[in-house]
Image (tube, grey):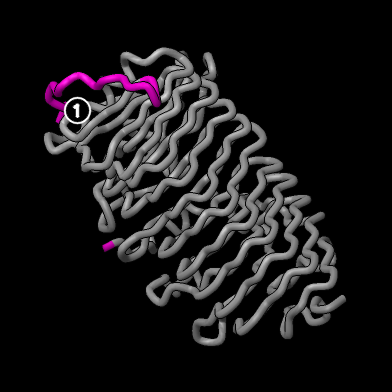
């Protein structure tokens, strides 16, 4: 996977003690107050329960394995447990960077949602996270809304083997590898989330699903990759990405992704410039097929006269071809080079894009 070659260039600057039992009230099934345990509430909840976590700071890892749980934060801020991480199914889903950027150790998620009976294959550095090796019983209908999640060394939220999960209206800040990662799931929706980092995070949102993943109306800033697309037919729509190294990034071999109506602006000044990273791109289509890239705005991608608004290329590692992709009615402003599709333009369609510069020439305003 291409991300392996660029990851090393990224420059990144205990079990919970027993708490009072969460209670119930007339407006929801379970209420959790500061000083109480969110995990205890989840463990006691039946399918279909709504758990409201009141405003306050909570130092916990959370695991959800029950379908149709609705976990609602009302000003709840989640940090890693003070006594250190406790291993769960999401432990080691991703790893920290190799030396010297990191120590190549297992990471942990803030909220780990997974279906029972699933198994994960071994970690392969090139993939950046583990893949499902055996399916089990999918966890269905889980909703996580209204949380602010900080400083986990892996994912703020990880979903493995889910169906119809909804991750909405959360704020994910300074998490080590991913803001939200979904793996092997169906019909995942991540919408209206804020994902940011103090300096430069790695991947804000990533879909590595079986089918039907949707990332919509999220606001992303200060990440190396804003929107990682590893799902055939995945939809990335109406998101805003600012001060990243890449906006939407469609991986080699992915077929039929849709990148529609996103606003991508301002390459981060601390993004690496050295090969193989180069200057990054507002939108990158690398060895993907039949992608629809439509009505996006990409602006202010500038770095030493080599900033690309749109990068379309074959994958130099796997040999996957970028072909059959359609780029239609996109607008490019104030980029060093609006469209770079050198060597692959003939295998793709460029239609009515508003831009000034392209390589090869003639890809603007057709």
Q: Is residue 171 magenta?
A: no
Say if residue 120 shows up in the picture. yes
Residue range (magenta): 13-29
Say if residue 106 shows up in the picture. no
Q: Residue at x 22, y 28 (%)?
A: 86
Horizontal side of 357 relative to 103 (left or right) equals right
Q: Residue at x 16, y 32 (%)?
A: 35
Q: Residue at x 39, y 63 (%)?
A: 9
Is disc 1 surrounded by few (<14), some (14 to 19) or many (20+) residues within 10 Å? some
Does 309 appear above or below 219? below
Residue 243 occupies which quadrant of the picture? bottom left
Q: Nearer the viewer, residue 304 or 109?
A: 109
Q: What SS does tag 1 mark?
A: loop
In the rendered picture of this protein, how many numbered marks are placed on residues? Answer: 1
- Point out the residue furthest to the front here: 26
Residue 232 occupies which quadrant of the picture? top right
Q: Main secondary structure of the magenta part?
A: loop
Residue 210, position in %: x, y? 63, 31
Residue 316, position in %: x, y? 61, 58
Q: Is residue 25 magenta?
A: yes
Q: Nearer the viewer, residue 113 or 168?
A: 168
Which residue in the structure is indicated by mark 1?
Answer: 36
Q: Residue at x 62, y 43 (%)?
A: 214
Residue 284 occupies which quadrant of the picture? bottom right
Does 244 appear above or below 139? below
Residue 241, position in %: x, y? 52, 63
Does 77 appear above or below 261? above
- Point out the residue furthest to the right here: 366
């Amino acid at each position: 996977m291409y991300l392996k070659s660029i990851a090393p260039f990224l420059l990144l600057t205990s079990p919970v003690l027993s708490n009072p039992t969460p209670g119930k009230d007339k407006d929801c099934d379970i209420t959790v107050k500061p000083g109480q345990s969110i995990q205890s509430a989840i463990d006691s909840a039946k399918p279909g329960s709504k758990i409201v976590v009141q405003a306050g700071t909570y130092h916990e890892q959370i695991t959800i394995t029950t379908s149709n749980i609705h976990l609602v934060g009302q000003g709840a801020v989640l940090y890693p447990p003070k006594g250190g991480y406790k291993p769960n199914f999401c432990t080691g889903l991703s790893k920290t960077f190799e030396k010297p950027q990191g120590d190549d150790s297992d990471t942990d998620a803030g909220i780990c949602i997974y279906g029972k009976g699933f198994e994960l294959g071994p970690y392969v550095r090139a993939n950046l996270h583990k893949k499902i090796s055996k399916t089990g019983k999918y966890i269905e209908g889980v909703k996580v809304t209204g949380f602010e999640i900080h400083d986990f060394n892996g994912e703020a939220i990880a979903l493995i083997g889910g169906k119809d999960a909804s991750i909405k209206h959360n704020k994910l800040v300074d998490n080590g590898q991913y803001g939200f990662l979904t793996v092997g799931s169906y019909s995942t929706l991540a919408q209206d989330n804020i994902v940011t980092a103090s300096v430069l995070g790695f991947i804000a949102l990533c879909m590595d699903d079986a089918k039907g993943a949707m990332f919509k109306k999220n606001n992303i800033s200060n990440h190396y990759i804003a929107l990682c697309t590893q799902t055939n037919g995945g939809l990335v729509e109406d998101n805003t990405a600012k001060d990243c190294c890449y906006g939407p990034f469609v991986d080699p071999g992915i077929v039929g992704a849709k990148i529609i109506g996103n606003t991508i602006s301002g390459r981060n000044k601390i993004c690496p410039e050295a090969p193989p990273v180069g200057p990054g791109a507002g939108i990158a289509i690398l060895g993907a097929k039949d992608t629809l890239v439509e009505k996006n705005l990409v602006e202010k991608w500038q770095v030493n006269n080599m900033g690309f608004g749109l990068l379309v290329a074959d994958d130099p590692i796997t040999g996957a071809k970028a072909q059959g992709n359609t780029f239609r009615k996109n607008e490019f402003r104030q980029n060093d080079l609006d469209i770079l599709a050198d060597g692959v333009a003939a295998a793709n369609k460029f239609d009515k894009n508003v831009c000034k510069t392209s390589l090869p020439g003639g890809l603007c305003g057709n």
